[in-house]
Image (spheres, rainbow, N blue to C red):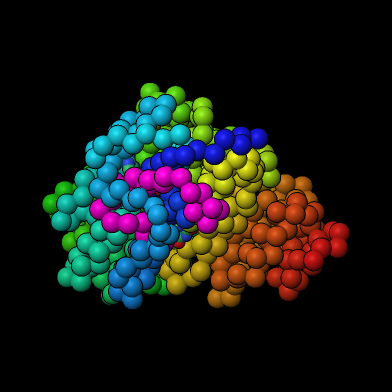
Amino acid sequence: MNRHVPRRIVIVGGGLAGHTAATTLRAEGYDGELILVSDEPCPPYDRPPLSKELLAGTVDDTTLLTAHDIEVRTGSRALRLFPDAVESTTGTYSFDGLVIATGSSPIRLADPSPRVHELRTGFDALRLREALRTASSVAVVGAGWIGNEVATRAAALNLEVTVIDAASAPLARAMPAPLAEHFVPWYADRGIDLRLGAPVDGVDERGVRLADGGRVDADLVVMGVGARPATGWLHGSGVPVAPDGAVEADATLRAGPGSVYAAGDAVRWPSSLFGDRLRVEHWDHAAASGRTAARNLLGLGEPYDPVPYFWSEQLGHRIQYVGHHRPADTFVLRGDPTGRGPWAALWFQGPRLRAALSIDDPRTTRDARRLIAGRVPLSADRAADPDVRLNETARTPFR
Ligand SMILES: Cc1cc2nc3c(=O)[nH]c(=O)nc-3n(C[C@H](O)[C@H](O)[C@H](O)COP(=O)(O)OP(=O)(O)OC[C@H]3O[C@@H](n4cnc5c(N)ncnc54)[C@H](O)[C@@H]3O)c2cc1C
């Protein structure tokens, strides 16, 4: 176990992971120097409300409260990492402990402009909210989590909304097509035109050009085609970065020689629970990994092995996903996806539940999370019965 406690810790990235690492260090009694370097112009804030409450206008500010004694350097972009210092646009910060928490940044098919929007920052969200006030039509590129949340809001404003995706089903990166097909009617229910199997060729002054020669003209184009770890500044530093940009950490989130840890969207870690290396873009993981990175900087040597958890609000439904599944896992439906009530999909490897996706069914999500964490064998047949509580389908007594 690493018992060396650094005297000067630098956290790069002022999102939830960086914020949680900083507040955890102080909560754990760390009394050395603590500097948080962020390229945004404001202190850390929360992102999930940006595409929900903030876009809807019920919230204006999602700032996270910061503990005392944290030097927050806003407007400071890390450019390079040396073994004992971070070079940034506002100066060089030496350290003997580091947390890499630079999150991810949106993949761009076109640069933002008055017509073209993306949604990653508070600034993006306020700009989009303002633009939605005067637009009459919106084209959303990408039927993923964030694209669908924007489409939900635009439809609530009675705008003409088109959602375009190259895949043959919505949410294609998150779930198998036979499952995602059950989401298709939700778009029509809200008056949204869903165009699947429609790769985009580009964006111009009228709207979106499709690869097959077609067009979707719209006042606004919102890009929601995914994000990539924001780790270019680590190039040549010795920190292992995979071709997809993820920082490759060990089971304690340590990511390089010395006291270097990584957290949040940017990190991939070996999960002993799932037997895979995982990288997820989830709020819950950003907080939990920020906490573990901080505690391990203080020498606690704790393994990081959570059950990943994600929620979203899509087209009038609360969707929750817990766990991690592989394409080869068998999935069973629990409840009727064609009805109006709650339902869920469960993924199994043998009798072991590996993941659950629930629609308007938080109790099944809660049960699934505990069953997955406890590696409890279930009867898949009984688990498919929505009249039996998931907890009660354990093959051995489980409370
Ligand atoms: C609109 C939106 C809605 C979401 N909704 C949900 C949801 O409903 N449920 C859910 O589970 N998750 C949701 N997420 C995902 C969740 O918010 C992220 O997983 C989480 O914010 C990741 O936290 P992070 O700290 O790792 O990264 P980030 O939040 O991306 O923070 C990283 C910070 O580092 C900064 N940075 C990057 N590069 C540098 C550099 N070189 N130098 C200095 N600073 C740098 C960035 O500007 C940013 O401030 C949503 C995300 C977005 C964008």
**Is most of the magenta stretch helix, strand or loop?**
loop
Position above or below: 22 against 300: below
The quarter of the picture where residue 3 lies is top right
* Quadrant (top left, top right, bottom left, bottom right) of the C terminus: bottom right
* Quadrant (top left, top right, bottom left, bottom right) of the N terminus: top right
Q: Position of residue 324 (x, y in %)?
A: 61, 49
Question: Which sits in the foreground, 151 or 322?
Answer: 322
Q: Position of residue 339 (x, y in %)?
A: 57, 73
Q: Residue at the spot x=41%, y=35% of the render?
A: 95
Does 27 lie within the magenta span? yes
Does 35 lie within the magenta span? yes
> What is the span of residues highlighted in magenta in the rendered image?
26-48
Q: Residue at the spot x=54%, y=39% of the render?
A: 5
Left or right of residue 365, residue 162 in this image: left
Position above or below: 327 against 115: above
Question: Which sits in the foreground, 7 or 42?
Answer: 7
Q: Position of residue 246 (x, y in %)?
A: 46, 36
Q: Residue at the spot x=36%, y=65% of the render?
A: 62
Residue 164, can we see it? no
Q: Residue at the spot x=59%, y=64% of the render?
A: 358
Position above or below: 271 against 256: below
